[in-house]
Amino acid sequence: MFNEMKMDDQVREPYRALVEWMEASGPEVLEQKRLEAETLFRKIGITFAVYGEGGDPERLIPFDLIPRIFTAGEWRKLERGVKQRARALNTFLYDVYHNAEIIKAGIVPADLVFKNAAFEPAVIGIDPPRKVYSHIVGVDIVRTGPEDFYVLEDNCRTPSGVSYMLENREIMMRMFPDLFKSLRIEPVESYPDMLLKTLKSIAPDKCDRDPNIVVLTPGAMNSAYYEHSFLADQMGVELVEGQDLFVSDGRVYMRTTRGPERVDVIYRRIDDDYIDPLCFRSDSVLGIPGLMNVYRSGGVAICSAPGAGVADDKAVYTYVPDMIRFYLGQEPILNNVPTWKCGKPDDLKYVLENLGELVVKEVHGSGGYGMLVGPASTKEEQVAYAQRIKADPGDFIAQPTLALSACPTFVESGIAPRHVDFRPFCLVGDTIRLAPGGLTRVAMREGSLVVNSSQGGGVKDTWIMTD
């Protein structure tokens, strides 16, 4: 396990000033600051929702006050790799909904795309503004060594967590102003402005004015509702539900006390199936009837586009390095984690014989649900999971259990290493924008590799140091 703070019992350069400050402050000050942070989280209302476990679904997300630190050089590599990946994924999406050249070339199997549950035939042939389908790409990255970074998965639909990135920084700056004065840390506060610029840049051709933008939420019961309202507030745009919008004369309008207002760009935070009951699920009460007709005619832009989810399928993920080579003519800057596709007979045989050593995931799974962490599972769990795999092999992929890097984390026993991952948020519009930071998620339980908040994981601030 690579300890990001210490190597060979020596504190690594990016952490030296922080370690000196922690040693000078002592555990009592850190505990006081931890309690202050928890109080701030409660006052601000930074929560997420977990349903099906009983009790109050609103949970306070665990926050660790010891930041994760990247050097400027490390960030430059990550930034180049994430932008390269976002560019390739968007080119792939445009391709598969048009000429499917990558499939004709025999690089990506046709069934993997056209029989994918996330592929939307209703989107075939549509030309979204700037040919961009996925406008916010959340790339989950893990680290295994000083120079070794791997992409664990891509999130091309509605990746969440950026509000935590921003609120983590706000709270850290409140609690440790002296540290921020003495250290040269890249700011992340520009993200809402960057997001707003990206959304404005994808306004449809029919928009003849400063575009009117809304954030479309399923409502207060959604697990990420805090983030929806936070981003709308930060951008200064309206937060709406489906019932607030309607279609008339080939345009989308918002109901207001001043009368109808035309909407040009919808940043939607609801799933494809629910955005238009006339095109997708007819029983949806969350969407806007007729929205897809307006989208097809170029009367509104939708961020991210319906059908973008086919690019973050965990089986499609295995072909992203090939996409980079095919579309961009480049070698991948960030490598994939080696992956076995259970839909392949040889891979299936290997996975079933080695369940105790692998991490197995559903190709459409998210949030840490529906997966098997082999080394942490029982024989009974492995037998039961094997039956699920055999019933539908193509619905599963497997990966080795990586020795994820660990960062210092303030826990009940003091400061101890805990496993982490990292999600930067890449914005794609007229250009590709990337705020210098991201969401570091931390597995608060000792030895755990599951960082998802729904599974007990927490968050911490991420510092990118300047040169």
Image (spheres, rainbow, N blue to C red):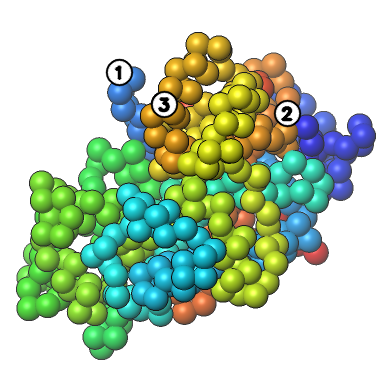
Estimate the spatial distance between the alpha carbons at disc 2 and disc 3, rounded to whole Å.
34 Å
Query: Which residue occupies 52% across, 18% down?
Result: 382
Q: Amino acid at mark 3?
A: Arg
Query: Which residue occupies 49% across, 47% down?
Result: 314
* Residue with the mark numbered 1: 54
Q: Earlier in the sequence, mark 2 or mark 3?
A: 3
In the rendered image, residue 132, in percent from the top left (x then y), is placed at: 41, 72
Query: Which residue occupies 28% across, 67% down?
Result: 123
Q: Quadrant of residue 403?
A: top right
Query: Residue 179: in sight, yes or no?
Result: no
Q: Quadrant of residue 256?
A: bottom left
Q: Earlier in the sequence, mark 1 or mark 2?
A: 1
Closer mark to the observer between disc 3 and disc 1: 3
Q: The residue tagged with tag 3: helix, strand or loop?
A: helix
Query: Residue 73: in sight, yes or no?
Result: yes
Closer mark to the observer between disc 2 and disc 3: 3
Q: Quadrant of the N terminus?
A: top right
| Most foreground residue, 401 or 441 | 401
Label of residue 454 in the image: none
Label of residue 388 in the image: 3
Q: Amino acid at mark 2?
A: Pro
* Residue with the mark numbered 2: 417
The 10 Å Cα crowd at callout 2, few under 14, some 14 to 19, many 20 or more, is many
Estimate the spatial distance between the alpha carbons at disc 1 and disc 2, rounded to whole Å.
31 Å
Q: Amino acid at mark 1?
A: Gly
- Give the left or right position of residue 253, taking residue 349 as reference: left
